[in-house]
Image (spheres, coloured by chain):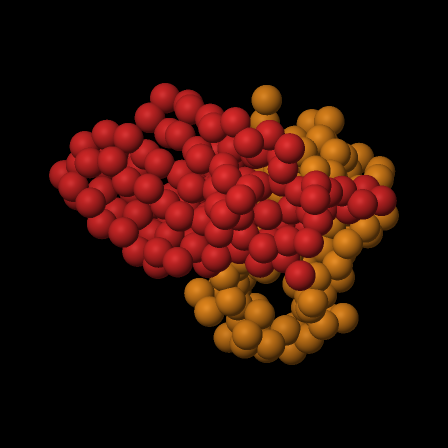
Chain colours: A orange, B red
Amino acid sequence: KAGVTQTPRYLIKTRGQQVTLSCSPISGHRSVSWYQQTPGQGLQFLFEYFSETQRNKGNFPGRFSGRQFSNSRSEMNVSTLELGDSALYLCASSLVPGREAFFGQGTRLTVV
Amino acid sequence: AQKVTQAQTEISVVEKEDVTLDCVYETRDTTYYLFWYKQPPSGELVFLIRRNSFDEQNEISGRYSWNFQKSTSSFNFTITASQVVDSAVYFCALSEAAVQGAQKLVFGQGTRLTINP
């Protein structure tokens, strides 16, 4: 059974640009959540989607957005990139909310 | 508000020693879930265990064991006879009960475990 797949694995962007990250959950999983990991702030929750609806959102500015498609795949978008957005972005999928969450390998975003 | 505290930032032991990673949590909910994850250098968070708040039974899986004590709000993780491959950053996390289909994991700051040969 394939795990959670995140693309791309690495990304370098310039300040002010926007970026879209993709996450394909484990087959059959309907809940997808996103996390940002930085050395200073640790792992922080961004948002969670279930059945194409955003069910929960973390304390991040509106520049961070996401969506989920009917096949449960999810994308997150960051607009007007800032240097502080440099981080490892991790996606997790679970069968339904509350169950075990399995993570992908992450997308490492560097903003220069 | 939910909070997870992993007071040990770094631990270094010699191979074959037993090591315990501490996790203390705060929540106002009576129904919640606790998790442990391992993050090797590759970056992926590897799921180790999920425990719900009504199940205080200790769990053992091979060399790994978990001690859940609601009275002290702790969910500690012990590795017996540690091996070099156990070297990683370990995270404890808390999730309150899914409300309206929502889930949010709150992570501790992590404990970097180094097993020396």
Residue at 20% over, 36% down: B17
Report the quarter where the N terminus of chain A lies.
Answer: top right
* Left or right: residue A38 compared with residue B104: left
Residue at 16% over, 41% down: B14
Q: Is residue B50 above or below residue B88?
A: above
Residue A52 location, quadrant: top right
Nearest the eye: B3 or A57: B3
Residue at 55% over, 42% down: B70
Nearest the eye: A102 or B104: B104
Q: Position of residue A56 (x, y in %)?
A: 77, 54
Q: Is residue B30 above or below residue A63?
A: above
Q: Is residue A69 visible?
A: no
Nearest the eye: B100 or A70: B100
Q: Is residue B95 visible?
A: yes
Residue A72 location, quadrant: top right
Numbered-mark total:
0
Q: Position of residue A40 (x, y in %)?
A: 46, 69
* Left or right: residue B73 compared with residue A72: left
Q: Position of residue A36 (x, y in %)?
A: 58, 59
Residue at 45% over, 49% down: B23
* Left or right: residue B19 compared with residue A91: left
Q: Position of residue B22 (x, y in %)?
A: 40, 48
